[in-house]
């Protein structure tokens, strides 16, 4: 028996729709990215993002249906991100999902975007089972989550200022390298010497699991400004490699400390920054030394997509968690097992 769920994702700058069968079997995965439009501003412009979602959402849903070769009346549910994210953008996906739910008389499942990022791991790794320490690192979030059981989460720590991906984006913007900064910096950093400059590792010695990246960003920018003032050459690739290793080091040490202190020997990485091979390998190596196994989604499912939303929605529905049509978009939404 098939069990088709459509996922819709419009929380930031990607308009995405996907059809997934039984939570794991991907029938279609359509992502329409607005990267080119926001590139010239060096970051996402919320007003432009919602307008672009309005233009793209129906064609994206049509493509997802066409590619999967199923029709709306074969769906057993419609899952949609309702937060956290840009409210104007979330509302576009939410309104379309509500309309489909109402017209087709199928359950509507509001999905937390961060939980969806976690589900990208469950979707691809059958072997992965709670308890897990999950590090969610994206453009908007840096959170360490203790997944005790499916739908039983506890946030151990999060960023007190900028998210990890946000710092990649801001440094890239400062250097006029383009948006999103993550993949661009990863490429340039691979040609640099990561030991060239000892940038700070913020909050590493604090006895908690919180992160802070804003000071690191300022150190990198001041380092460059000083070289400009002194009319010295700027070793850009070395600076970026030294910055990247500082991020990797903090993420790895905090995540592994969380795993060791909770007695959990499985780590899952999620979110756009988990697409960074250098950071992923850095965490994997440190984990291996501590006999901890690391799982992460394939690159395509690390960054925003609707497959992860459909998958989380399928398992929510199985768990009898569905939403009613009055569900609203929520800009700041924590992961919570009591929703
Ligand atoms: O998960 P995502 O697509 O959207 C959010 O939920 O925020 O993550 C996007 C973020 C951006 O900040 C981007 O620069 C970062 O993920 N990112 C990366 C890489 N690919 C994407 N950061 C570092 N290295 C990468 N290769
Ligand atoms: Zn995301």
Image (cartoon, rainbow, N blue to C red):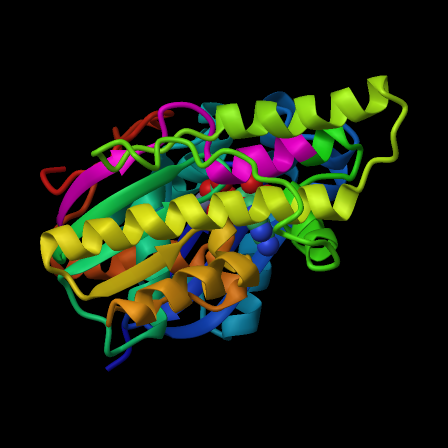
What residue range appears in magenta? 152-171
Residue 57 drawn above or below residue 219: below
Q: If the image is split into quadrants, where does the N terminus sit?
A: bottom left
Is-magenta flag for residue 132? no
Q: In which quarter of the image is ligand 2?
A: top left
Residue at 32% x, 71% y is 288
Residue at 39% x, 41% y is 99
Q: Which of 277 and 151 is in front in this view?
A: 277
Residue 5 appears in the figure: no
Quarter assignment of residue 174? top right
Residue 339 appears in the figure: yes
Quarter assignment of residue 132? bottom left
Q: Where is residue 309 in the image (x, y as percent from the top left)?
A: 37, 53
Q: Nearer the viewer, residue 197 or 51?
A: 197
Q: Nearer the viewer, residue 202 or 57?
A: 202
Q: Position of residue 143 (x, y in %)?
A: 32, 40
Q: Where is residue 35 in the image (x, y as percent from the top left)?
A: 69, 42
Residue 114 drawn above or below residue 77: above
Residue 120 drawn above or below residue 114: below
Residue at 65% x, 53% y is 186
Does residue 196 appear left or right of residue 57 in this picture?
Answer: right
Q: Position of residue 104 (x, y in %)?
A: 33, 53
Does residue 86 appear left or right of residue 146 in this picture?
Answer: right
Is-magenta flag for residue 157? yes
Extreme bottom residue here? 1
Q: If the image is split into quadrants, where does the C terminus sit?
A: top left
């Amino acid at each position: 028996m098939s069990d088709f769920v459509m996922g819709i994702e419009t929380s930031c700058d990607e308009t995405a729709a996907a059809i997934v069968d039984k939570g794991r079997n991907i029938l279609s995965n359509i992502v329409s990215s607005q990267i080119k439009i926001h590139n010239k501003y060096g970051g996402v412009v919320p007003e432009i993002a919602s307008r672009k979602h309005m233009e793209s959402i129906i064609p994206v849903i049509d493509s997802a249906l066409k590619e999967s070769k199923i029709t709306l009346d074969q769906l057993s549910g419609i899952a949609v991100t309702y937060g956290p994210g840009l409210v104007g953008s979330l509302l576009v996906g939410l309104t379309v999902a509500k309309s489909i739910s109402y017209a087709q008389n199928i359950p509507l499942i509001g999905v937390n975007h961060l939980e969806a990022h976690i589900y990208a791991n469950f979707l691809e790794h059958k072997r992965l089972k709670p308890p897990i320490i999950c590090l969610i690192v994206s453009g908007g979030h840096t959170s360490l989550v203790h997944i005790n059981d499916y739908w039983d989460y506890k946030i151990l720590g999060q960023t007190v200022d900028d998210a990890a991906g946000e710092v990649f984006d801001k440094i890239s913007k400062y250097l006029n390298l383009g948006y999103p900064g993550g993949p661009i910096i990863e490429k340039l950093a691979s040609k640099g010497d990561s030991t060239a400059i000892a940038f700070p590792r913020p909050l590493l010695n604090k006895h908690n699991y919180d992160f802070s990246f804003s000071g690191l960003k300022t150190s990198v920018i001041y380092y460059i400004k000083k070289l400009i003032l002194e009319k010295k050459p700027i070793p850009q690739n070395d600076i970026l490699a030294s910055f990247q290793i500082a991020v990797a080091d903090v993420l790895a040490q905090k995540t592994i400390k969380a795993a060791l202190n909770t007695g959990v020997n499985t780590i899952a990485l999620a979110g756009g920054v988990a697409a960074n091979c250098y950071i992923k390998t850095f965490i994997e190596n440190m984990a291996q030394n501590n006999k901890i196994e690391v799982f992460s989604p394939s690159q395509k499912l690390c960054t925003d997509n609707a497959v992860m939303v459909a998958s989380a929605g399928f398992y929510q529905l199985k768990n009898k968690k569905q939403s009613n049509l009055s569900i609203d978009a929520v800009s700041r939404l924590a992961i919570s097992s009591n929703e």
